Amino acid sequence: MFKFMSLKESIVKEQIPQHIAIIMDGNGRWAKKRGNQRIFGHRNGVNAVRAVTEAAGELGVKYLTLYAFSTENWNRPRPEIEALMSLLVSTINSETDTLLKNGVCLRTIGDTESLPPSVAAKLKEATAKTSGCNGLNLILALNYSSRWEITNAMTRIAKSVLDGQISPANITSETISSHLCTGGIPDPELIIRTSGEYRLSNFLLWQAAYSEFYFTDVLWPDFDKEELYRAIVDFQKRERRFGKISEQL
């Protein structure tokens, strides 16, 4: 009898994207549909983070970047921001041991030093604890925006020029990449956005130059392992040409 392959079985292991980045969107709408406050959606979104992190580690993904809090998110109502920061601290407290057990290295990108002191301290503690892990690199984009990141990189490069450490004639795209928060991290091959929105929202603009995009109507709290498998299967069907034509590949 013919047996249908599952989504996971359909994934070609040799073509697993090395770096997947996700814009986690839809927590508030998910909660509103259930007659609850937005923070209820954020709390349930943690389950999706856990599932996707586990699935990525099992598949052999090397880097998973999650857009958790943007610089623009400070414009949200203060009670929601305070609840988000509290949720972040409690989640780190409850999940750090699991990350260690599974060899997951927690990293951050963004202006984390400007986060509330309790949050910044907890992040620093967790990243230090897991720094020796050699499995999946889980990268949280916190207080992050790509325009902030690029501006910060340009400022650092300009200072190096003034100090005589870099000649303007020697500035290359590699110079810029190395001064970004993601310096040393490969650009994402696949960027996923949930909740039916079709924009990058100031996320990894430089790094996304040749990323493949996958948009889904699924709200983030409902995004599970199967949804990640579906995105990867779709990614593996694409022809990535990087400016070349098909015959050159």
Image (spheres, grey):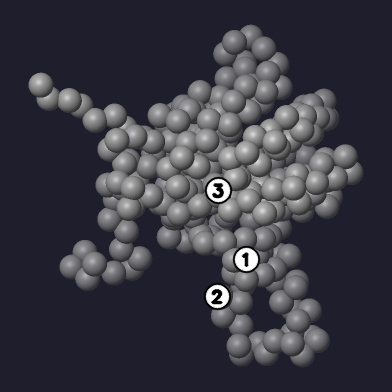
Give the side of residue 55 with respect to residue 46, left or right. Answer: left
Give the x, y percent position of residue 177. 59, 69
Whether label 3 touches label 1, CB < 8 Å = no
**Residue 197 in sight:** no
- Closer mark to the observer between disc 2 and disc 3: 3
Q: From the image, tell me which residue sits under label 2.
A: 173
Q: Residues within 10 Å of mark 3 (few under 14, many from 20)?
A: many
Give the x, y percent position of residue 15. 33, 52
Give the side of residue 227 with respect to residue 206, left or right. Answer: left
The residue under the point 61% across, 83% down is 171
Q: Quick one: SS at disc 3?
A: loop
Question: What amino acid does circle 1 point to?
Answer: Gly
Question: What amino acid does circle 2 point to?
Answer: Ser
Q: From the image, tell me which residue sits under label 1.
A: 183
Give the x, y percent position of residue 208. 50, 57
The residue under the point 67% across, 23% down is 43
> Which of marks 2 and 1 precedes in the sequence?
2
In the picture, the quarter occupied by the C terminus is bottom left
Q: From the image, tell me which residue sits under label 3.
A: 136
